[in-house]
């Protein structure tokens, strides 16, 4: 599963490049959507525990950026995704995003 976004004026910072906070929001939503396959029949959801993002190159107005997960690691109570964001065959960002499943405010075991 990949996700593609087109950069619009509202996504730019004062340097006319993609605002990093906007990219982090897109990454968080993209990775969260990938946790859906691990929800059990009671419907508990995952929440973001940690994000690590290295901004490698800027992206600009009109660019199409593509997000993809390159690796998925499933633990007892968490899932970590390694992701890449590219545009025009250029790396924009890379990093990891970790999610935990909560139930009554406590970590909850992931059952596959």
Image (spheres, rainbow, N blue to C red):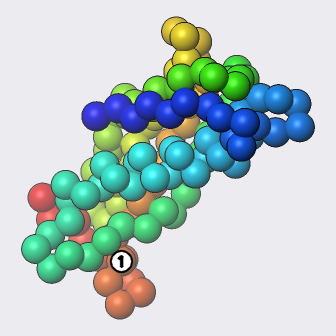
Looking at the image, the residue that sits furthest to the bottom is 104
56 vs 18, nearest the viewer: 18
The image quarter in which residue 36 lies: bottom left
Place of residue 103 in the rendered image (x, y in percent of width and height, measured from the top left)? 32, 84
- The quadrant of the image that shows the N terminus is top left
> Is any atom of residue 20 visible in this view?
no
Residue 98 seen in the figure: yes
Check disc 1: other Cα within 10 Å, few if <14, some if 14-19, many if 20+.
some
Q: Label 1 belongs to which residue? A: 102
Residue at 62% over, 31% down: 7
Front one among 13 and 69: 13
For residue 43, side relative to residue 27 (left or right) = left
Residue 91 lies, in percent from the top left, at 58, 18
Q: On the rendered structure, is 39 left or right of 27?
A: left
SS for callout 1:
strand
Spot occupied by residue 71 in the image (x, y as percentages of width and height):
34, 33
Q: Quadrant of residue 2?
A: top left
**Above or below 79: residue 65:** above
Left or right, residue 69 beside residue 61: left
Tell me what residue is drawn at x 46 percent, y 52 percent: 29
Going 55% across and 18% down the picture, which residue do you hit?
87
**Left or right: where 37 falls relative to 32:** left
């Amino acid at each position: 599963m990949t996700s593609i976004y087109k950069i619009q004026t509202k996504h730019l910072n004062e340097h006319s490049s993609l605002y990093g906070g906007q990219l982090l929001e897109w990454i968080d939503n993209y990775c969260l959507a990938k946790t859906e396959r691990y929800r059990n029949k009671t419907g508990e959801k995952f929440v973001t525990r940690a994000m690590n993002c290295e901004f490698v190159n800027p992206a600009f107005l009109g660019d199409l950026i593509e997000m993809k997960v390159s690796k998925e690691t499933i633990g007892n109570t968490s899932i970590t995704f390694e992701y890449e964001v590219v545009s025009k065959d250029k790396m924009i960002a890379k990093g990891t995003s970790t999610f935990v499943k909560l139930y009554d405010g406590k970590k909850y075991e992931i059952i596959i």
